[in-house]
């Protein structure tokens, strides 16, 4: 079977490796062509950086193209030259339009149980919402946003301690298994139900900010949902933003210092007893691992010692 692969992210790179096969031994689904997004400036130095799929394709020795648009005539001709039986799409990050949608069987690997969490950030939104489970859906790509019919899906529980990193790793494995099964068996497609539709909007800077006007339990989920890839942040009194990589909710009745002092109810970050705390509405969040701007991640206690901080921050 001849395949073409469209993808960009780390999640998509893992799926690409699964198509090629374990231990570098190609199987019948190794793509004849991999298409991903162009290199972009990234990091503090703004150096050109390749998408994860491009890096993985080079390691695997696959033919690679990085067009500005997958829908332009030159790219369409490139795909036509391959004459694929199936085009696999996973986290490509750009719209695929006609005539590609009609010219080829297009399988999209989406990490949610559709129709819940259609869109750009399904893993993060599922954790943020406190969902008890998620999964992977194999669907036919259509012009609508993740609204095409589904041929396979698998369920994955969301554990209380899951971060984006731990959950994505399990979903990558599940997605690879389902994708190969879909290519092997060609199961029938079933239209998605019209109810239960939710949208996983693209993450914004506002999503990263730990707003003390929100409950502590919600903010703890935000920290986990954004770790380790983009990270949550808390705003200090001077307007600077402190990254937060790990946090836990201090349960009602739990003291936050050895002296058993009462928890403060006023929202905002403060230091007490060697701990960095965020008063929320309601609850208190214990910020365990933080990262100053341009610095390395460290325990909150080390951050407080290094900056000589106490009281309101």
Image: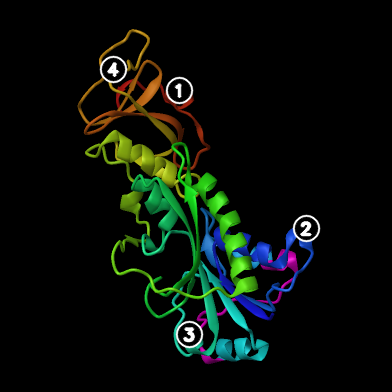
Q: Which mark is residue 253?
A: 4
Whether pointer 2 and pointer 4 mark residues with C-beta atoms closer than 8 Å, the reply is no
Name which of mark 1 and mark 2 comes first in the sequence: 2
Give the distance between the C-alpha atoms of the residues marked 1 and 2, in whole angstroms.
43 Å
Q: In this view of the protein, which residue sits in the foreground, 124 or 274?
A: 124
Report whether residue 48 is seen: no
Residue that label 2 marks = 23
Name which of mark 4 and mark 3 comes first in the sequence: 3
Give the distance between the C-alpha atoms of the residues marked 2 and 4, in whole angstroms.
52 Å
Name which of mark 2 and mark 4 comes first in the sequence: 2
Give the distance between the C-alpha atoms of the residues marked 4 and 1, in whole angstroms.
22 Å
Residue that label 3 marks = 101
Whether pointer 2 and pointer 3 mark residues with C-beta atoms closer than 8 Å, the reply is no
Give the distance between the C-alpha atoms of the residues marked 3 and 1, in whole angstroms.
54 Å
Q: Under tag 2, what secondary structure?
A: helix
Q: Is residue 97 above or below residue 47?
A: below
Q: Is residue 71 magenta?
A: yes
Mark 2 neighbour class, 10 Å CA radius: few under 14, some 14 to 19, many 20 or more = few
Give the distance between the C-alpha atoms of the residues marked 2 and 3, in whole angstroms.
33 Å
Residue that label 1 marks = 301
Q: In this view of the protein, which residue sits in the foreground, 26 or 271?
A: 26
């Amino acid at each position: 079977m001849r395949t073409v692969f469209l993808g960009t992210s780390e999640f998509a790179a893992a799926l690409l490796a699964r198509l090629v096969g374990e231990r570098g031994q190609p199987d019948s689904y190794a793509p004849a062509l991999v298409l991903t997004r162009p290199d972009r400036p990234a990091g503090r130095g703004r150096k050109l950086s390749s998408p994860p799929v491009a890096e993985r394709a080079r390691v695997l020795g696959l033919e690679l193209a990085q067009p500005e648009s997958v829908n332009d005539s030159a790219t369409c001709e490139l795909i036509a030259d391959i004459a694929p039986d199936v085009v696999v799409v996973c986290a490509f990050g750009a719209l695929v339009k006609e005539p590609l949608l009609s010219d080829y069987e297009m399988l999209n690997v989406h990490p949610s149980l559709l129709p819940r969490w259609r869109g750009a950030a399904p893993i993060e939104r599922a954790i943020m919402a406190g969902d008890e489970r998620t999964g992977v859906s194999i669907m036919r790509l259509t012009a609508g946003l993740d609204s095409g019919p589904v041929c396979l899906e698998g369920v994955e529980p969301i554990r209380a301690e899951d971060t984006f990193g731990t959950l994505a790793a399990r979903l990558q494995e599940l997605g690879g298994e389902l994708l190969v099964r879909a290519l092997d068996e060609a199961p029938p497609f079933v239209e998605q139900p019209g109810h239960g539709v939710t949208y996983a909007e693209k993450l914004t800077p506002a999503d990263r900010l730990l707003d003390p006007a929100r409950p502590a339990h919600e903010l703890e989920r935000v920290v986990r949902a954004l770790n380790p890839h983009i990270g949550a942040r808390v705003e200090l009194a001077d307007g600077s933003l402190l990254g937060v990589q790990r946090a836990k909710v201090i349960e009602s009745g739990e003291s936050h210092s050895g002296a058993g002092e009462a928890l403060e109810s006023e929202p905002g970050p403060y230091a007490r007893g060697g701990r960095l705390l965020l008063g929320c509405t309601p609850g208190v969040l214990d910020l365990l691992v933080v990262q100053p701007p341009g610095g390395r991640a460290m325990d909150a206690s080390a951050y407080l010692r290094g900056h000589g901080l106490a009281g309101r921050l």
